[in-house]
Amino acid sequence: MHEARTISIEVNGVLREAAAEPRIHLADFLRHTLGLTGTHIGCEHGVCGACTVLLDGASVRSCLTLAVQAHGRTVTTIEGVAAPDGALHPLQAALAAHHGLQCGYCTPGVVMTLIELQRELDGQPIEEPAVRKALAGNLCRCTGYQGMVDAALSVLNAQQTTAMEGSAP
Ligand code: FES
Ligand code: FES
C-alpha cells in the first residue's frame, strides 16, 4: 500500500484538505472522504458518465481521475450548482419541469455535462441533435432522454427565445 499524502482541492468554492492514497480516484475521494455523495458511481470505468464533475471547469470522469491529480485545482460537483439560497440551477429546474429524470441516478452527471455545454455555447443557440450528441456520454436507463433533451433546449435556447420575442413587431 502506498502512503497517503495530503492534498488540497477547492471544491465548490471551499478549500478542502485531506489525506488521499495515490490510487484513490476522485469519485471515491469526493464521496467517502469529503462526504459529497451527490457524485454517483455506476460503471467505474469511464462509460456511464454518472460520476461526471467539473475539474477547472471542464468535465471529467471522476472514476478515471485520481484524487491527487486534482491537487491544487478546482472541482465543481452537483452540490455546488444550486444558488446559495438553495434555488435550483436553471438546468436542474428544467429537468424537473420536463420530467428529465426518473430514478435520478444519472442526473448529477447529466447536469454537470449540460453546465459545461452551456458555458461552451456562451449564449449561442443549439439544435436537438447537438444536445443529444453532448449527452451521448451520460447513460440513462430510465427516461428515454426526450425530457432531458427538452429540458436542455429550453434553457440553452432561452436567450434566443427572449431575443426573438423582444424583436417581434
Ligand atoms: Fe465513472 Fe461510470 S462511474 S463513467
Ligand atoms: Fe434513472 Fe437516468 S433517471 S438512470
Image (cartoon, rainbow, N blue to C red):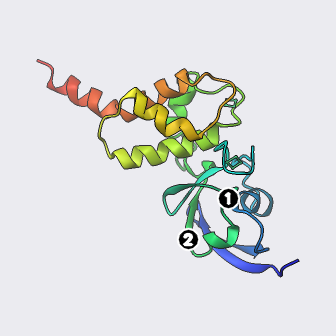
Residue that label 1 marks: 64
x and y percentages locating residue 155 in the rendered image: 41, 32
x and y percentages locating residue 132 in the rendered image: 48, 31
Quadrant of the image occupied by residue 21: bottom right
x and y percentages locating residue 88 in the rendered image: 54, 39
Element type at mark 1: loop
Along the viewing direction, whichever of 3 and 137 lies nearer the viewer = 137
**Quarter holding the N terminus?**
bottom right
Q: In this view, does 113 lie above or below 133?
A: below
Asked whether, in this view, residue 24 is left or right of residue 101, the answer is right
Quadrant of the image occupied by residue 16: bottom right
Q: Is mark 1 within 8 Å of ligand 1?
A: yes
x and y percentages locating residue 4 in the rendered image: 80, 79
Asked whether, in this view, residue 58 is left or right of residue 105, the answer is left
Write the residue at 67% across / 50% down.
Answer: 46
The crowding category of the residue bearing disc 2, from other C-alpha atoms within 10 Å (few below 14, some 14 to 19, many at least 20), is: some
Under mark 1, the amino acid is: Leu
